[in-house]
Amino acid sequence: VALQKRDDVDIEGGWPVGKPVPYAALSKAFSLIEATTKRLEKNAILTSFLLLVIQRSAKSDHASLLQAVYLCINRLCPDYVGIELGIGESLLIKAIAESTGRSLSVIKADLKKEGDLGLVAMNSKNSQKTLFKPKPLTIPFVFSHLKEIALSSGHSSQAKKVSIITKLLAACQGVEAKYIVRSLEGKLRIGNAERSVLVALSQAAVLAERERSNKKWSQDQLAARLEESANIMKSVYSELPTYDLVIPALLEVGIDGLRQKCKLTPGVPLKPMLAKPTKAIGEVLDRFENKRFTCEYKYDGERAQVHLLEDGSVKVFSRNSEDMSKKYPDLVDQLPKCIKETTKSFVFDAEAVAIDRTTGKLMPFQELSRRKRKDVKVEDITVQVSLFAFDLLYLNGEPLLQLPLYRRRELLREHFVVVPGEFGFAKSSDSETTEEIQSFLEESVKDGCEGLMVKMLDTDASFYEPSRRSVNWLKLKKDYLAGVGDSLDLVVVGGYYGKGKRTNVYGAFLLACYDSDSEEYQTICKIGTGFSEEVLQTHYNTLKPLETTKPRGDIKVGGAKPDIWFEPKIVWEVLTADLSLSPIYTAAQGLVEDRGISLRFPRYLRIRDDKSADDATGPEQAKMYERQALAQPKGKKKKGGD
Ligand code: ATP
């Protein structure tokens, strides 16, 4: 469908070419996007806004578009730099009170009524009588102040944050306060996922090019061109996920030159390829029928994407693109021994696994999780780690993503050296029959692994697909086969006060999955088992600062009634025996049927601090386990999950 440009996006009078983009223009686009549920309309609004930004920026000005895009996805820098917003409710309430002269208790009461602090801030501002019209906010002003807030740390940082927020709020007009506050909270909640921003960005670039060159395209040609450019943008960004490089390149060489200019670069982590779960070896064979595939040990550790930059420095990134080089100084030290002289730069994908160096035995993830996360000193390390590399994505100046897996694997084995206990290649077997796979699976479990990863080896489909959960990688976990059920990664959104011995902590929790399409957290179960007293205390300490009086607006609550709500931030891995349909919870509502789904007998396994709330299991994925439920004999009564 060809895009309809939206003329109502511009603010009254527009803004002059070469001048900073008014924040009013961005917040107008946000409110138009929020007001519609139609995807195409949201896309047309955002594209039209970004087009205005491109057209009204001076030629060498890359910052305006860059900052506008960052504000649209509510980030301030690439993921791996790790500067985050996410200001607590109480600090924001204080700032709203200070900038509007209303009392804390009135603001709290409003929040209880509205459930959206952004709205409360906006209403508080708009009911205030001001003598002077404040100087209009601009995108560079808002962006730099948000960054200053995110960067301030130390003991006087709270007061500093409140004072900057107060200053920002004092200058807000119209709907601006609503979006400033939501940005500060860490979530815009306008139903505008990052994927859509990428598409809008590519489309805005095409439209700008068309208007500049006065090209005459038919509707069909335009539609084809828009689709092609969206695909280019998505693929480029998945290889080089940083707007800091992609946006200047886009403005310089246009969409057609982007692939050439923006390639995988050591130092910029790409989002890892993910696997689909399978429940039986038969399923694997059906999927890979007549194709070559390989089975690899699925190691029970932490994903590590390791980069060697041209300048000789080594970086280790987590599944979440977090820089873990300081968590693993030992890996960084160990690495040079494993690299052949001919290897000058690389990116490989690996699992970091705890190992007992005296026996060579692999240790479970729990052992690895005993390591400190920050400022680790090599001499203090008690839990040793070995890397098991399973893919090579970049070598000596060349991205390898488009090569088939068998070739990437050959290059990996050619350019690195095994050092027992420190570095190895994922153990693999290219076996093909059910019996062979079964016995390799058993061997993997005996060796301390979770099962197998089965991967397409040599067709076109075996290239590396960043950030995709691909059917060309299947995971075969021992738990699925044993019928124990599978684990899901869920966000903690609510708490229930404990009883008896547990009155000083939360005794049970409300969990939710995350739907990235609608950008909402959908409740899925209450969990109260699997916790030791000590673990409950730790959870209390972590969750207490995240308490909120009302569920945040993007939590689809259903009938759940916890005693207290939390900012959706913390992710737990939870084991479930099965799923059931639920009148209470909202997960996957409308996907299976009108009712939601719930977990039966959920058990807490561990914190997933390598996942952010948006990486939690989605309703589609959760629903997959429904097959298990449906497969139950007819007439067997299922219990609700609460
Ligand atoms: P998901 O989001 O897919 O659930 P996850 O992080 O919860 O991801 P799993 O579903 O258990 O992890 O499986 C994929 C993970 O297995 C990879 O992210 C990686 O950390 C780990 N892994 C271990 N061995 C391998 C291997 N040989 N190939 C690929 N991944 C492996």
Image (spheres, helix red, strand yellow):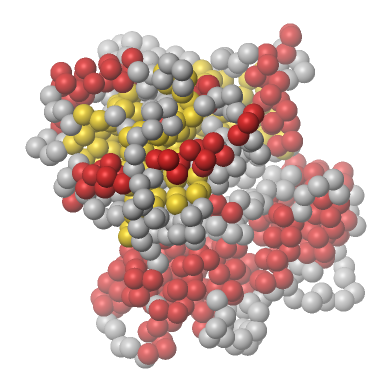
Q: Which residue is painted at 30% across and 88% down in the image?
A: 216
Give 128 or 243, whichever is nearer the viewer: 243
Q: Quadrant of residue 362?
A: top left
Where residue 505 sits in the image (x, y, percent)?
Answer: 73, 20
Q: Give the x, y percent position of residue 60.
A: 55, 83
Q: Above or below — where is 426 with respect to 107? A: above
Image quadrant for the N terminus?
bottom left
Q: Nearer the viewer, residue 412 or 493?
A: 412
Q: Position of residue 426 (x, y in %)?
A: 32, 32
Q: Is residue 250 visible?
A: yes
**Outermost residue to the bottom:** 214
Task: Identify which residue is drawn at 85% across, 58% down.
Answer: 163
Q: Quadrant of residue 555?
A: top right
Q: Is residue 138 left or right of residue 409?
A: right
Q: Quadrant of ligand 1?
A: top left
Q: Is residue 29 visible?
A: no
Relative to residue 139, is residue 576 depicted above or below? above
Q: Residue at x 79, y 58 (%)?
A: 165
- Left or right, 314 with respect to 64, comes to left
| Horizontal relation, residue 460 to residue 303: left or right | left
Compared with 490, 97 (above or below) is below
Q: Nearer the viewer, residue 548 or 159?
A: 159
Instruction: Looking at the picture, tell me which residue is in the foreground, 82 or 132.
Output: 82
Q: Residue at x 21, y 48 (%)?
A: 407
The spot of residue 277 in percent (x, y) is 32, 31
Vertical side of 444 occupied by 460: above or below: below
Give the tally of numbered discs. Answer: 0
Is residue 321 left or right of 292 when viewed as pictured? right
Residue lying at the far left of the rendered structure = 290
